[in-house]
Each structure stands twice: as structure tokens, then as C-alpha cells.
Amino acid sequence: MKINLKSMKMMNKRMILRYLIENGAASRMEVSRFTKLTPSTISRIVSELSSENLVEEIGYSDKSQIGRKPVNVSVTKRFLSSIIFNVGVEQTTVAIGFFDKSIKEIKRFSTVNLESFISTVNDTLENIKERYPLNHELTSIVFAFPGIVNAQNATVIYAPNLNWRNLNLRDVIKYGYRIIADNEANLSVLAESISSEDAKKSENIFFLYVSQGIGGGAMINHQILRGSGFAGAEIGHTVVEAKSDIKCHCGNYGCLERYASLILPVIEYEKNGRRLDGKTYTEKFKTLAELYAKQDKVARASLEGFIQYLSIGLINIINTFNPEIIIIGGGFNKIWKYFGKELYRRISDRAMPGVIDNVIFRDTIFETIEAPVSGANVLAIEMLINNLD
């Protein structure tokens, strides 16, 4: 891009917005010190951003000890930056996101079938439009899907566990707002890269999304690996049993997803008439993990295959992507807490010498808000900033 006064001004506007989004409210002087722009330039740009309803003054700073207290400036919450649909195999979470990265969950509904899903989405959007402030130019509707998603044109190429194919969301969602879609694991790794301190400092991170299926999100050199067909990092559909007769939803046999999702250990535990507390597989898996921690023999036997194959999946991630951090989350966000010690032992037995010495394994930092929901809002904010005139 040719640098001229107009493009330089736009770069400065984006830099100021990103600073306020990442660091919260700040005085004009604080922004000036960080950006190295003159106070007069900061004041001029902040005034322009305020007239565009992107920033607002929110009170006085308590950081100054001498003289008149400076006024804090913050990105605005006058409109939603995003309306988010985190689509799961069993249920869909609906949330709203704001420009300051804050998020509020609105509702959950069962992901029954495509026709019902589209109807519920449109009804939900109508309800949100009546209750919350939207901006036709700045608000985005963001979908997180388990499967292969063309992020360029908001099309679900294939969601194996839902059996949805070639779903162009812009054709079926009849609202005049920007529509964005991406894979749930890609959005999860994006959320971690923005929100967690260790991920911010790392060039290569991997998010292993374990739910009713298994997905992967890889960030290489600070860029999400989507691949030429948008199937980058689909670790759940790598083969871990070459001679398996267990068919995966993707059409292949022996996929990691068919051996290390949350579903199989639950089925294994319940196959002889036993019942786990919970309505969904995620809730039942949580109960099973708690029984495992209490040394329940049946729970431990039911989880043996899950732990073994998950350790194989983690080895494959290490050998393929060689990340600095591997984050585990999804339907149940405490897998490393409950099974990390045993997983690490098995990984160590299989790993090549030295390759895991500097790898950090941990659970996702997101517990109350789902990681893809946070990532969806980040994606909407980034698109908003990049599309400013």
C-alpha cells in the first residue's frame, strides 16, 4: 500500500483503536506514549473517532497524582460489534459481543436439523434487533461451526457431525448485516492469541477442540492456518487406526475423532445399564471425569481408550506442527486438569528426544464464555477495524 497522508491517518486510527481494545480505557497522554504520536494528533484522531461513535469519554483517570486528572477514553458500547452463533452438534449458543471485547450470552437452543436451525437463527436475530443497539455498517453476525468452513464467503463446506454441506449462510440469513463464519477451533485459537499472556508471546500455538467431534486450530507465525481448501489443522480426521472398521462421519475409517471424542467413554460407561448424571454428552463426560478423579474403577476403564488415543493425537500435533503451546478445550474445558498427568506420561513415552521439552500443555483459559464465542467477537472487531474508511 502506498503511504500517503490519508493512508497514514487510517493506520493511526486503527493503531489507537487496537490499543484501547487490548488495554482498556486510557487517557490521551497514555495513548500518545504508547503510539509515539503527538498529543495533538491523538486528540484530533480521538475527536474523529468519537464523531463516528467508535470511542467515548468515560470519566477521569486515577493514574495521575499531580494536577488536573486526565479524561479516560474507551471504545464505545453504543452498538453490538457481533451477534454470535456457536453451533454445536447438540446445542447452539447465542451471544452478543461489544467493541471492548466484552460478551454476553443470550440463550441456547438445540441444534436439531438445518431447517429448524435457520428458522431459529432468523427468529433470534429479530428478537436481538428489537432489544439491542445494532449498526448496519459495523455489526457482524458471526457463526462458529464444527467442520470445514470457507471463511472468505461464509459457506459451510462440510460439517460432518451435522451432515450439512455447501451451506451459504448469506443466502439463508436474511438480515442486512455483515455475515462471517469460521471453524470453531480456528476461532478458539484466535481468542487465546488475543487474551492469554503466554499465547500472545508465542508464534506457533495449537488449539485442540475436543467435543462430540475433534477439531484443530493452528496459528503459525501469528497467522491462522486455514489451508487451500479451508481444512488446515483438521487433526480429528487424521487416521490413528489404519485397519479400523469404524467409519467416521467424514467417510474415512479410523479417524482420531471416532476414538477420542467425549462420546465414546460415555457410551462405554453406560453400555451395561449404568447412567451418568447429565443431559448432554458434555455434562455426562464431566460426571465421568469426576468419577475418574475419585479412582472409580469403571470410570477409569471407560476412559482408557480416550486417554490413549488422545495422547496419540497430541503426539501427531507435536510432530506435525511443533507448536510452543498446545491448548485443550471445547465441550469440556478441564481435560488437562483431570487427565494431564497421565497424558503427559504417555506422550513422553512416544515422543522423540527433546521435542516436548519446551512445549506447554494446558486447558483453555475460557470457562464461563466459550472460546469460539470470544474468538468470533475478536474476528468481528478485526474486520470492523480493517474496513474503516
Image (cartoon, rainbow, N blue to C red):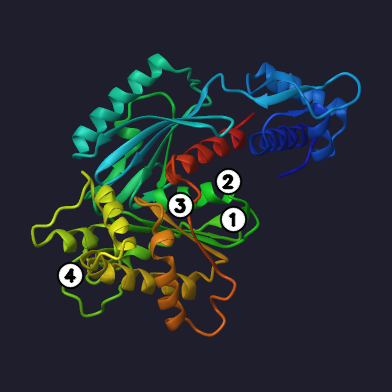
The image position of residue 144, as x and y in percent, is 38, 43
Instruction: Look at the image and tell me in which quarter the C terminus lies.
Output: top right
Give the residue pinned by disc 1. 199
Give the residue pinned by disc 4. 246
- Which structural element holds mark 2? helix
Count of numbered circles on the image: 4
- Left or right: residue 211 versus residue 342 is left
Do callouts 2 and 3 mark residues in contact (Cβ within 8 Å)? no
| Front disc: 4 or 1 | 1
The image position of residue 90, as x and y in percent, is 24, 44
> Amino acid under label 2?
Ser
- Left or right: residue 15 versus residue 218 is right
> Which of the marked residues, 4 or 2, is nearer the chain's N terminus?
2
How far apart are the alpha carbons under marks 4 and 1?
A: 36 Å
The image position of residue 262, as x and y in percent, is 28, 57
Q: Nearer the viewer, residue 95 or 61?
A: 61
> Which of the marked residues, 2 or 3, is nearer the chain's N terminus?
3
- Left or right: residue 141 versus residue 75 is left
> Which residue is at a point 34% across and 63% down the rendered structure image?
236
Do callouts 1 and 2 mark residues in contact (Cβ within 8 Å)? yes
Mark on residue 195?
A: 2
The image position of residue 361, as x and y in percent, is 50, 64
Give the residue pinned by disc 3. 186
How far apart are the alpha carbons under marks 4 and 2?
A: 38 Å
How far apart are the alpha carbons under marks 1 and 2?
A: 8 Å
| Front disc: 3 or 1 | 1
- Left or right: residue 252 versus residue 74 is left
Mark on residue 357?
A: none
Residue occupying the far left of the picture: 273
> Amino acid under label 1?
Ala
> Which residue is at a point 42% across and 43% down the rendered structure image?
370
